[in-house]
Image: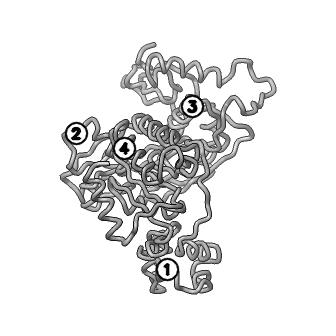
Amino acid sequence: MSRRQVGRADGRAAELGLSGDDAGCTVLHADMDAFYASVELRSRPDLLGQPVIVGGGTRGVVLSATYEARRSGVHAAMPMARARRLCPQAVVLQPHHETYSEVSRGVMEVFRSVTPLVEPLSLDEAFLDVAGALRRLGSPTAIARQVRDRIADEQGITCSVGVASTKFVAKLASSAAKPDGLLVVPVADTVPFVHSLPVGDLWGVGPRTQEVLERLGLRTVADLAHTPLRTLERALGQAQGAHLHELAWGRDPRRVVPETPGKSIGADETFARDVDDPRIVHREILRLSEKVAARVRGDGKVGRTVVLKVRFADFTTITRSRTLRTPTDVSRDVHAAAVAAFDGLGLDRARIRLVGVRLEGLQDAAEAPLQLELGAPEQGWRDAEQAVDRLSRRFGAGVVRPGTLVDRRRVGLTAAPDGSRGEPVPDGRGYEPSGRGT
């Protein structure tokens, strides 16, 4: 840890009145700082210290922003158009998702080299239970410093780490340490630390819940903690009221549960203009289904639940899911379920901004039961799509695709009656060359 980082961490702890005693604080929450933006800046060091936004076009949303851009009010999930208005001087970079996945794998390898008890929350953050690593690696604070140093050295990005006795408080500590910091919340200081925070920092308090609490005059966690439990249960419901009351006193019995990252794989697309033609949506669902299934096969997985996401022009978002009888990695199956979910919405010329497809409930393909259809050919859709995967690895993604997705105007396969190049065929599942060569 650099002198700047040491001074910053000690200063933040002193500001909060924390002693720094890490005895019994065996839960770490490690969170990368502005992850996507930090990864992009590795190849653009000329942009360090400048406002940078990672996102797609004017119709997409912000994936990440540097802290310089955040000072202008830019944040993740904000529409790109609004982010550009708030921070017109920002440099906008296109995302590179494969690179983010690669860096994430490296980060998780660092975590798992410290302890097998790693609970990933997303690509760029995880809980670690380091109780079993103390004799080998030293105190929780020492382990947190090692993790931060290794991520900086091996991946070229920074992370903030919270050290505490529970998951909830460790996550609060990492947020308070950002960016590029480390904060220990001693067991004896847990309640004062939690009570000093605004109620919006509690897990499970969204904008609506915060509004309800503030109407009751509860603006800090201390206010909530000293409110009778029955009052909270009447205002929020029994379960949520009891949950927030426990958190307000720093009580969180949940253990760090090791999980395999990637329990679902999905993809979505924001249209350049709002779409109200179901044929266009069907084409996009097909393209996304192909992409998702290929990624699932590439990871050696199969999944059973297909989830469709639709975001309308007013940013209202809905999801619908279909659970298959048996797990699959075949795009034909994913596509059929996603289209059925979309058609089941019964939309009548609704203006759609975004559509997404996700496959959930992933498991290893080798361990999944296969359901053989009566009369099905020995070489079926899965074999065909695996052959497409091999061609894609050799010649590039998209070298073979369903006929529906072929841009016939570009490859010259079809001409309209007036002699102009026609639009792609509106339906069908035959595979055709995309024009890139085989």
Three-letter amino acid code of the residue under disc 2: Pro
Which mark is nearer the camera, 2 or 4?
4
Query: Does residue 279 appear in this view?
Result: no
- Residue 149 marker: 4
Q: Are marks 1 and 3 in contact (CB under 8 Å)?
A: no
C-alpha gap between disc 1 and disc 3 = 44 Å
Left or right: where 368 falls relative to 166: right
| Residue pictured at 53% horizontal, 62% vertical | 165
Q: Earlier in the sequence, mark 1 or mark 4?
A: 4
The location of residue 219, given as percent across then percent down, is 43, 80
C-alpha gap between disc 2 and disc 3 = 32 Å
Left or right: where 306 falls relative to 414: right
Q: Earlier in the sequence, mark 1 or mark 3?
A: 1
Three-letter amino acid code of the residue under disc 1: Val
C-alpha gap between disc 2 and disc 4 = 19 Å
Left or right: where 267 falls relative to 10: right
In the rendered image, which residue does mark 1 sit on? 212
In the rendered image, which residue does mark 3 sit on? 299
Q: Earlier in the sequence, mark 2 or mark 3?
A: 2
Classify 141 as above or below 288.
below
| Residue pictured at 44% horizontal, 17% vertical | 395
Disc 4 residue crowd, few under 14, some 14–19, many 20+, Cα 10 Å? some
Which mark is nearer the camera, 2 or 3?
2
Disc 3 residue crowd, few under 14, some 14–19, many 20+, Cα 10 Å? some
The location of residue 151, given as percent across then percent down, is 39, 41
Identify the image quadrant of residue 101: top left
Three-letter amino acid code of the residue under disc 3: Asp
The location of residue 214, given as percent across then percent down, is 45, 81
Disc 2 residue crowd, few under 14, some 14–19, many 20+, Cα 10 Å? few
Which mark is nearer the camera, 3 or 4?
4
